[in-house]
Amino acid sequence: MDKQREASAAHWADETAAKIIREKGEKDLYTCASGITPSGTVHIGNFREIISVDLVARALRDMGKKVRFIYSWDDYDVFRKVPKNMPKQDELQNYLRFPITMAPDPWDRDASYARHHEVDVETMLPFVGIQPEYLYQAERYRSSRYAEGIRKALEHRDTLKSILDKFRDEDHKIQGEWWPVSVFCDKCNRDDTDIDGWDGDWGLGYHCNACGHKETVDIRKAAGVKLGWRIDWPMRWQYEQVDFEPAGKDHHSQGGSFDTARLVCKEVYGWDAPVTFRYDFIGTKGVPGKMSSSSGQVIALADVLRVYTPELTRYLFAGTRPNTEFTISFDLDVIKIYEDYDRLERIAWKAEPAKNDDAYRRARRIYELSQVGAVPAVMPYQIPFRHLCNLIQIADGNIDQAIAGISPAPAPEQIPGLKARAACAKYWVEESAPEEFRFCLRGEGERAPLSDSETAAIRDLRDKVIAGIEQYRDDKSCAEAIYKVAEDHGMDGKVLFRAAYQALIGKDQGPRLANFLRSIKQERLLAILRAY
């Protein structure tokens, strides 16, 4: 099996890459595209499109192809609504109907509202290994880069109207005079304008309903003329020679924007629409419904990266087909996701057997695409996420202290990845974990309200088990010794466990006791239990 066919069998990104080559033919350069309007916080649902394109671009490069990955900031779109999570609401209201790029940054950090959200994304994407070429549509429109495309739309106004009406019922077809362009007023900057006419060449007349300004502009020089988005999208496909761009399921609905854009692209701009696929929405636990930047109800990439390492974050998407809806969890499911990734990693490194060769190839490919860069030269150090959380709590949040005593000791090249995982574990346990998962060791001299029989059993646990805890080579032998203490006191094991947890962390339950005791420094345990 040749490399392309073998890769195609392994992962959906490879299947898509093979389809692009098949449909677009052999090319010196393949262009993959994505983009969004920075109308508010760019959320993790938007990131699904970005990483989907990145995965396909990687697959093309792995097939030896040269790829241009462009990301368009549609910052010349209209500022229609102030999201609820934005500061300076009253000030931003004054810029409604302006181009988004003209609204001020309410945090006073960047040149504009749009630029603030762009910077937030552009600074985070390198952490997950994504570095596209950014295109800023406000700059491109204002420099009249699309003058030819705008004129072509005006020349084919009737054709465009027919295409847009093709998928509409009679009640929703375009009524009256219609123009494929809109204009931001040169005086007040709002888009509350009407087109008065086009001279068949480069002159376009308009008047502003907001301020009364009226003029005829030269499309080749005018800064405020813009195509409607259903025309703008396919125009840019042709302009940038786009070979691949995915879209959400709302755009891919039958008769939706992708269907009309495909016809516009071919019939007006003479370019075959890009290869595409539909990606589904993403949910988060505790946030009902579809995420929306305009409403302010969002989880951003930065929020995800506080809980999941960059490799785990990529894995969430690389390990899921794009047309599958899934939920990103911040509760106890985090532990399971880390466990799933660790098993995938072991299979990819052949440290754990796969069911068969196909299962190995799939696991290896998902693992490769989950890495920020190349697959590391040495398998990363694996420590269960649950255990790491316990170690961090035992160490009172000190990451260096938490990982200092783990055995076997990590190799120097494994330490950065281990510390990155520990940072996520620390954040999760302190900010996101359920209360029952959290604990704090008692200080010296603190004493739990135990019965006399429980107190006697805790003394024996201290003197007969903890005092010689180094003799237990594994959790099983330590657990047997703990149960022997309970038996000696005629006590149910559960009763002793509860008493031990109360004495150590002030709770009725906690981590598995044998492992817990073996994870804490002996002198600290003895100091806590000296009060009994």
Image: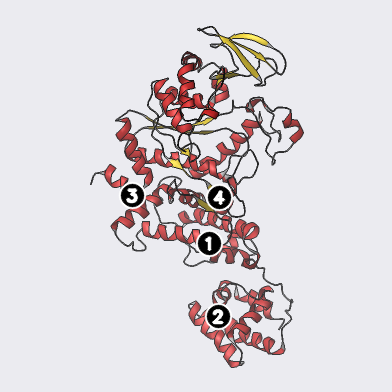
Question: What residue type is disc 2 on?
Answer: Ile
Q: Which numbered disc, 3 or 4, marks the residue that appears first in the sequence?
A: 3
Q: Between marks 2 and 3, how big is the CA–CA gap?
A: 48 Å
Question: What residue type is disc 4 on?
Answer: Gly
Q: Which residue is mark 1?
A: 335
Toward the right, the furthest residue is 90
Tell me where residue 21 appears, x and y as whole percent. 31, 34
Secondary structure of the residue carrying tag 2 is helix
Label 4 environment density (alpha carbons within 10 Å; few <14, some 14–19, many ≥20): many
Q: Which residue is mark 3?
A: 10
Q: Which numbered disc, 1 or 2, marks the residue that appears first in the sequence?
A: 1
Q: Which mark is residue 283?
A: 4
Q: Between marks 1 and 3, how big is the CA–CA gap?
A: 26 Å
Q: Which numbered disc, 2 or 4, marks the residue that appears first in the sequence?
A: 4
For the residues carrying marks 4 and 1, which lies nearer the camera in this image? 4
Label 2 environment density (alpha carbons within 10 Å; few <14, some 14–19, many ≥20): some
Front residue of 130/9: it is: 9
Q: Between marks 2 and 4, how big is the CA–CA gap?
A: 46 Å
Residue depicted at x 59% and y 27%? 77
Total marks in image:
4
For the residues carrying marks 2 and 4, which lies nearer the camera in this image? 4
Q: Between marks 3 and 4, how big is the CA–CA gap?
A: 26 Å
Residue depicted at x 39% and y 49%? 368
Question: What residue type is disc 1 on?
Answer: Ile
